[in-house]
Every structure is written in C-alpha cells, then in structure tokens.
Image (cartoon, rainbow, N blue to C red):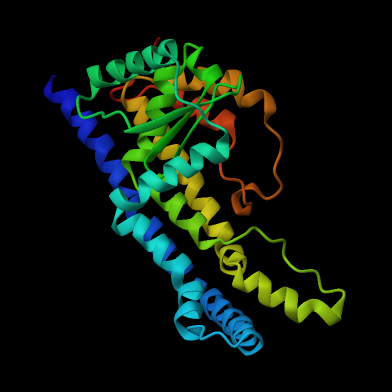
Amino acid sequence: MSDASKGVLATARGALRAGLGPGMLLYSATLAGELSAALARWLIAAVVLNVAAWITGWPIPVQALALAVAFGPLAASLLCLICPPLMDPIAGRWWEMSCGGRPPEPDEREAFERAIAQLRATDPSVRAPRHWFVAEDSRRNAAAYAASLRLDRGLLESPYVAPVLAHELAHLRSSDARLTSALNLLLLSPMDTPAIRPLRSLALRGLLWVACGQAALWLTANAWEMYWRSRELAADEYAARLGLGFGLASALEADALPHEQPIARMRFSRATHPYTKPRIVKLRAPGPGRSERE
C-alpha cells in the first residue's frame, strides 16, 4: 500500500476515534440524569416489597432487592462500555431475536465475504464482525448494535453490499454501536410523556415516567439526535475514504431518497439521520482517497 493510501486510512481511523469524546460526555450527562430514575425505582420497589413482606410474612431482603432494581439498569449500561466482551454477545443475540433475524444462507455469506475482501483491499485492518445476521426484509439496509450487524436480505441481493457495509463498520469501529446498546439498557420500557390531565393520576404517571428511564432520555433526546446525525456523516466519510462514496450515494439514492419527508426544525429535531440529498452530494464530491467512478 502506498504512503498516500496509508495516510488517508490513518486520517479516516482518526476521524472515527474522534467521535468517542463527545458521545461519552453526552452519555455521562444522561447517566447522571438517570440517577433520578434509579431513585424512583428504589422508592417503588421498596414500597411494593415491604407490602409483600407484610402480607406474606416472608423474610424478603427488601433493601438488597430494591437496590438491584434501582441500579441494575445503570450497571448493565455501564458494562456495555467498560466490558464489551461480556455484554456485547448478549445484547447482539437479543437484538437478533427481537428483529426476527436468521443465520445467513451460503449465497448471502458469500456476498458478505466478497464485500469484506473488497474493503480489506483498501484497508487491511478491516475485520468482519463476529456476529452478523440477516433480516428477512426486501429493503437494502443495514444496522449496527453493540458488536453485531444486521443486514437486510435485499441488501445482500443488491450491488451495494460493500459501500453500505463500510458505513456500518464505521459505526462498529467507533463507539456508536456500543453507545446505542448502553442507552437502550437505561430504558426499562418506552413511555409517552404524561399528559397533564387527568390531574388525579398525574403524580403517579409522572413517577412511572421517571422510573422507567424515559424522563432523562427525553431531556437529552435533542442533543443525542444531533450527535447521531454527526455520526452518520462520519460513517459516510469513512466509506468515501475507502473509495466507496459513489456506491454509498447510489444506495442512498435508490432506497432512502424516495422516502424522504420534510422535518420541521430539522437542526433541533429528533431525527436520527440528516437529510439524504446533502449526504449524496457530499459523498459524490471529489476528495482525497475517493474514487470518482464505480
């Protein structure tokens, strides 16, 4: 590999690592907010367990169980970041089951391995994820979570496997996929923001909203979505530096652009992805390490 190519790849890897700092700062702020959720869970668990112990007469270890319920989600979330080998396989398998995923068939595995070989021709440090699965979906999409990768069946049957895979591997190589997993573990169950009426149940609904972890995530949601949009652009840049910008632009043009909808106050919205058209234009713009044709 030439010195110029090595410089391009080093720059790409540096850009990926640069995304770790802001994400961790935002995660720390979110985790601090989730302490209120832990306190609410402790209160609810302590009351329920004390009532159960009083009714049944059983020697229930109320304090130990209440603390486990209160801080268990926070501990599991932290483990996703500080001990990935322990949590990533569990999170990945659970995600596969939740997506209705399946193991790849021989032709799908062959398409995947061809794409990995194509990426390694430019960047020898590219590694295939240990766990990836196929979603029975005709769309040409992919996603990364924890240390796992989901590929739609339609993508593996398309000519866009390598560019889309490069984009998703960028998320896996950085903190993006692990942060997504860590954030999901902070939320016990999705819950809508409580309406003010009826007033008689507002206090209870508000307590449950805080206890499930939704309140802290709601407060930081806009900041997180702004961060995720920047990470999408960083992953695009990595694919472009591998010479696959035109291919990724074509994939976006074929699958994402036709379904684009206007979003009010986009910059401050909770959209996880930036608008597709600017991404396509940027991917097709000439730059160092970018291929000008497929």
Q: In this image, 118 relative to 158: left or right? A: left
Q: Can residue 252 be seen in the rendering of this structure?
A: yes
The relative height of residue 40 versus residue 215 in the rendered view (above or below) is below
The relative height of residue 106 versus residue 208 in the rendered view (above or below) is above
The relative height of residue 142 versus residue 250 in the rendered view (above or below) is below
Q: Can residue 176 be seen in the rendering of this structure?
A: no
The relative height of residue 113 versus residue 45 in the rendered view (above or below) is above
Give how far across and how far down residue 47 sits, in percent.
62, 85
Give how far across and how far down residue 152 sits, in percent.
53, 24
Residue at 37% over, 26% down? 240
Give how far across and how far down residue 3 sits, in percent.
12, 24
Quadrant of image for the C terminus: top left
Q: In this image, 134 relative to 169: left or right? A: right
Q: In this image, 230 relative to 264: left or right? A: left
Q: Nearer the viewer, residue 63 or 31?
A: 63
Residue at 58% over, 59% down? 221
Total number of numbered labels?
0
Give how far across and how far down residue 211 sits, in percent.
60, 73
Q: Residue furthest right?
A: 198
Q: Nearer the viewer, residue 257 or 285?
A: 257
Residue at 37% over, 27% down? 166
Q: Quadrant of residue 23?
A: bottom left
Residue at 40% over, 25% down? 165
Quadrant of image for the N terminus: top left
